[in-house]
Image (spheres, grey):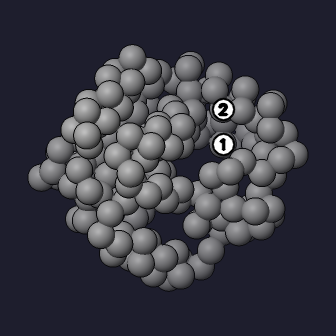
């Protein structure tokens, strides 16, 4: 396990899991949100974003946390392991709402500076629609992946993966 993608619905716990996996393995974490978004929730130029992802995946060791389906093929081509945090819709929605309430007006540590936590109805709809719209595309992409795919449907399953990763790193 040298290049790990952590993917799943917003609110599934990708950033938290990635930080814990980093602590267990010593692999550096790359939060895609921090590299994608610019201050004020400004999106980058598509060519610039593609070049950024190419640069990030060229590193020899990493944990990359985030979705960004348009760049999934590039990331899968370099990854050796994918961890899909496949939490339920209601849990993800609750976590996103809780995160927004707790951090409203502040920038999370896994986000770009100047991207203040806010309520965004479109984002909440994306979370709600993720199982129906995004998960099938992710599942299809993973079917062609020749590395290790670990699917965690619960926090307990994710904790087991962390314990196994820590034991393997010792």
- Label 2: which secondary element: helix
Residue 50 seen:
no
Residue at (53% x, 82% y) in the render: 48
- Give x and y (percent) for residue 132: 42, 32
Residue at (83% x, 47% y) in the render: 106
Q: Quadrant of residue 164?
A: top left
Label placed on residue 70 = none
Image check: 125 left or right of 100?
Answer: left
- Residue count near mark 1 (Cα–Cα under 10 Å), binned few <14, some 14–19, many ≥20: few
- Give x and y (percent) for residue 166: 31, 36
Q: Point out the tag, 2 or 1, that comes first from the N-terminus.
A: 2
Residue at (61% x, 61% y) in the render: 34
- Give x and y (percent) for residue 134: 42, 42
Q: Report which residue position mark 2 lands on.
A: 96
Q: Report which residue position mark 1 lands on.
A: 123
Q: CB atoms at circles 2 and 1 under 8 Å apart?
A: yes
Q: Residue furthest front?
A: 170
């Amino acid at each position: 396990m040298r290049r790990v993608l952590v993917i799943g619905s917003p609110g599934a716990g990708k950033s938290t899991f990635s930080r814990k996996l980093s602590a267990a393995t010593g692999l550096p974490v790359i939060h895609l949100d921090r590299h994608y978004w610019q201050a004020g929730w400004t999106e980058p130029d598509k060519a610039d974003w593609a070049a950024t992802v190419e640069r990030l995946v060229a590193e020899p060791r990493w944990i990359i946390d985030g979705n960004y389906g348009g760049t999934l093929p590039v990331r899968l081509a370099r990854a050796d392991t994918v961890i899909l945090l496949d939490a339920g819709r209601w849990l993800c929605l609750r976590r996103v709402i809780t995160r927004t309430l707790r951090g409203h007006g502040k920038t999370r540590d896994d986000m770009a500076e100047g991207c203040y936590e806010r309520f965004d109805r479109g984002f909440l709809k994306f979370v709600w629609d993720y199982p129906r719209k995004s998960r099938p595309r992710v599942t299809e992409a993973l079917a062609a992946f020749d590395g290790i795919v670990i699917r965690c449907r619960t926090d307990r399953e994710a904790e087991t993966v962390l314990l196994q990763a820590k034991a393997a790193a010792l």
